[in-house]
Amino acid sequence: MRVLLALSLLAWPGAAEEPPLVLRDAVQLAVAHHQDVAKAKASAEALKGKIREVRSQALPDVKFALDATRWRDPSLLNASGINNFPDYLQQALIPSAVNLFDYSLTVKQPLFTQGKIGTALRLANIEAEGALSEIDRAEQDVALATVKAFYGLLWAEQSRSLVVETQEQKKLHAEMARTRYRNGVATEVDVLRSEVAVANGQPDLVRAENAIKQARAELNYYLGRPLDFATRLAGNFQEMPWEQNDLTELTNDAMRRRPEIERLRIAERSASTQLELARAEDRIRMDFTGSYGLMARLPQNLVNSEFIRWSAGINFTFPVFDGFKRSGLVTQALASQRIARLDREKFEQQVRLAIQQAYDDLRSAQESIAAAKATVSEAERVLAMMQDNYKYGAATTLDIADAETAVSVARGNLLRGLYDYSASRANLRWSIGQTPWE
């Protein structure tokens, strides 16, 4: 009975909570479940099938055919001199319907195609390499989006904590004002101002709760979970200093590691191979064809070796004029080759720009954190002084409100700086082809 009770409790929804997610586990979960990664892998599988399809052009094409025909052929009656034949002979030439049974095995094998099949096979293999780069690109993109969503939820949760703490300070000050009012050392205006401040803070708390809900839904989207799943996080923002400051070195790393650049290089190779394939179009071709089987009018003769029929031959094809088809294909391939090179050069410039911007954003966030930390310390000190002064009547409710606002803004700036630094750091790592998480 106890075992059944325990099993029922375990099966109850929510009885066993999901453990908090660390950043690395969140990224791995997203990469394993996101549709973009699955789509890239499916495209790679499709190209494997394409390679098999192209390879089949170099292999024998073997077919087995079985036919059963009933037919009547009046060809002799349509002969031009049939009227000169005697009547009895003309009557003998009148055909009757007959059956014809035939089964055979046919083989067709390309012997020489001017390199067309080999070029097509190399092209398919190159495209398969590109599909692997597409998988890497999809995984990197999903990883970056997940990292940003993870930090977004961290920011929303900690921002709510700041709002709650600020609201508690306002409530304490309101209680202090009411106590001083009862003791006759504060005015009713002070009480009303402090209570209004508490009421004005309630919408901030509602907005903070909504921000958490939206941030959690976004993270759940990348994790492949229901949008309202109660995902919990473990970890904090990154504060480690960035040590690699040579932009040239960062750019060189990106050129080596970015899957998009590798994909564009593969596209250039593909365009060059397409050019070779276009030049091999409509050239000399040689094929072997063969057939072996039996043909008989009576079914019992289908096993009689006297009715065996076979053929074997080599076919040569010499194109003479194709209406400038090959010339058009070559022109298209040359243009595609030039476009592929320009796309790569353009993207490399975009990568350089992205690295510069990500590095500047990282430095800006780092300086913002340092400034915000100093401001938070000063603002908290001013608030403590204002609260002490208020106890002795040396400060007003407005002084307290101003000090609380300054502390809230300073802490919010610090939290925003931490989020910006972590997101910028992840973005810079992604820009140079590294994993966005550490």
Image (spheres, grey):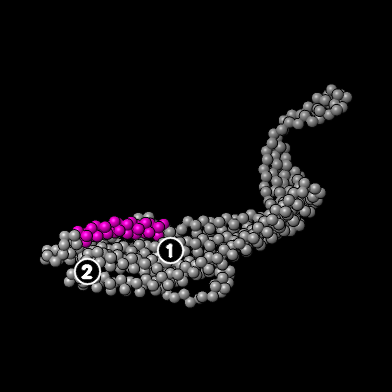
In which image quadrant can residue 17 be found? bottom left
Q: Position of residue 268 (x, y in %)?
A: 65, 61
Which stretch did the figure color magenta? 192-221
Q: In the displayed structure, would residue 172 be above or below residue 295?
A: below
On screen, residue 349 versus residue 142, left or right, reads right
Q: Is residue 84 visible?
A: yes
**Disc 1: which residue:** 148
Do the numbered discs 2 and 1 sit on residues whose CB atoms are within 8 Å? no
Nearer-the-camera pick, 308 or 239: 239
In which image quadrant can residue 171 be found? bottom left
**Disc 2: which residue:** 395
Residue ID at (39%, 74%): 370
Examine the structure image and report whether residue 228 is included in the region drawn in magenta.
no
On screen, residue 317 versus residue 358, left or right, reads right
On screen, residue 412 versus residue 266, left or right, reads left
How many marks are shown on the rendered structure? 2
Q: Is residue 125 visible?
A: no
Examine the structure image and report whether residue 218 is included in the region drawn in magenta.
yes
Query: Which residue occupies the extreme left position in the image?
Result: 183
Give the secondary structure at mark 1: helix
The three-letter code of the residue at mark 1 reads Lys
Q: In the displayed structure, would residue 246 be above or below residue 103?
A: below
Magenta stretch prevailing secondary structure: helix
Nearer-the-camera pick, 312 or 395: 395
Q: Position of residue 392 (x, y in %)?
A: 17, 71
